[in-house]
Amino acid sequence: ETVLTQSPGTLSLSTGERATLSCRASQTVSSSYVAWYQQKPGQAPRLLIIGATSRATGIPDRFSGSGSGTDFTLTISRLEPEDFAVYYCQQYGNSPETFGQGTKVEIK
Amino acid sequence: QVQLQESGPGLVEPSQTLSLTCTVSGASISSGAYYWSWIRQHPGKGLEWIGYIYYTGSTYYNPSLRSRITISSDTSKNQFSLRLSSVTAADTAVYYCARKFSSSPFDYWGQGTLVTVSS
C-alpha cells in the first residue's frame, strides 16, 4: 500500500499569510493521481485539487497544487479566515487508495 | 445536485455486524460509470478507504478489511450498503459514503454517521 506522509502536522499562520503543505508518498503515484481535501469540524471532506494540479469546481484560485512522482504540495497563497481547517492528501493512482494523516492549519 | 445520506445504528455491540445504508439522490447508482464508496474516519484521525461498488455491481475492497466487508446495492431504492462483520472497538469511526468517477477522487460525500462499537 502507498503510505502518504503529510508535513507539518500543524501549521500556525495568520490571515493573509502563505501556507505550504507537503505530502510525500512511499512510492510513485501513478499518473500523479493525487487529490487534496479540506475538512472542517463536523463536516465531510471537501475536494480542492484533482490530479495534483487542477482545482475542483468552485475552488478559489488562492488554492494551488503541484508536484509529481512522490512529492506533492498544496499552497494557499493568502489565507482567508475560512481556510483554517485540516487538509488531507489522497492518492488514487495505486491500489488501494490511501489518505495522508492530515495537516491542521490553525490561526496563529 | 448529487446528495448522499448515510443511515444506520449509531451503536453496535462487539462481535456483531455493522450495517449502514447510503441513499443517493440527484444521480442513479446504476448508471454513469461511477464508483459508490465507503470511507471511514476514526475519532480525531485520518481517512481510510473501505471499498466501493461500481455501477455494474462489481465490488472492490480494501485488502485490510476485505475478509469482513460486504458492499451491496439496491438499485430500485437507489441505495448502497455496507456490512462490516465481527466489529471491535477499533471499528468505532465516522462512516462516510461518497462517489467517485473512474481515475478520479471522491467528489460528493455524505455528511457522515458516527458508529460506536461498545457493549
Image (spheres, coloured by chain):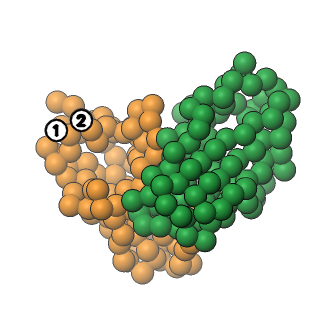
Drawn side of residue A66 relative to residue B101, left or right: right
In front here: A27 or B74? A27
Q: Tell if the residue under mark 2 belongs to the same chain as the one under mark 1.
A: yes
- Residue A39 visible: no
**Residue at 73 percent of width and 60 percent of height:** A53
Task: Report in which chain the residue with disc 1 lies.
Answer: B
Query: Residue B5 — which label?
Result: none
Circle 2 residue: B89
Position of residue B9 relative to residue A25, above or below, is: above
**Residue at 78 percent of width and 28 percent of height:** A81
Residue A15: x and y in percent read 82, 26
Callout 2 touching callout 1 (CB < 8 Å): yes
Going by the picture, which residue comes out furthest to the top? A108
Chain A is which colour?
green
Residue A13: x and y in percent read 74, 25
Task: Report in which chain the residue with disc 2 lies.
Answer: B
Label whose residue precedes the other's in the sequence (2 or 1): 1
Q: Residues within 10 Å of mark 1 (few under 14, many from 20)?
A: some
**Residue at 68 percent of width and 49 percent of height:** A73
Residue B7: x and y in percent read 39, 48
Drawn side of residue B109 relative to residue B96, left or right: right
Circle 1 residue: B14
Frontmost of labels 2 and 1 is 2
Going by the picture, which residue comes out furthest to the left? B15
Residue A93: x and y in percent read 53, 67
Position of residue A39 relative to residue B37, above or below, is: above
Chain assigned orange: B
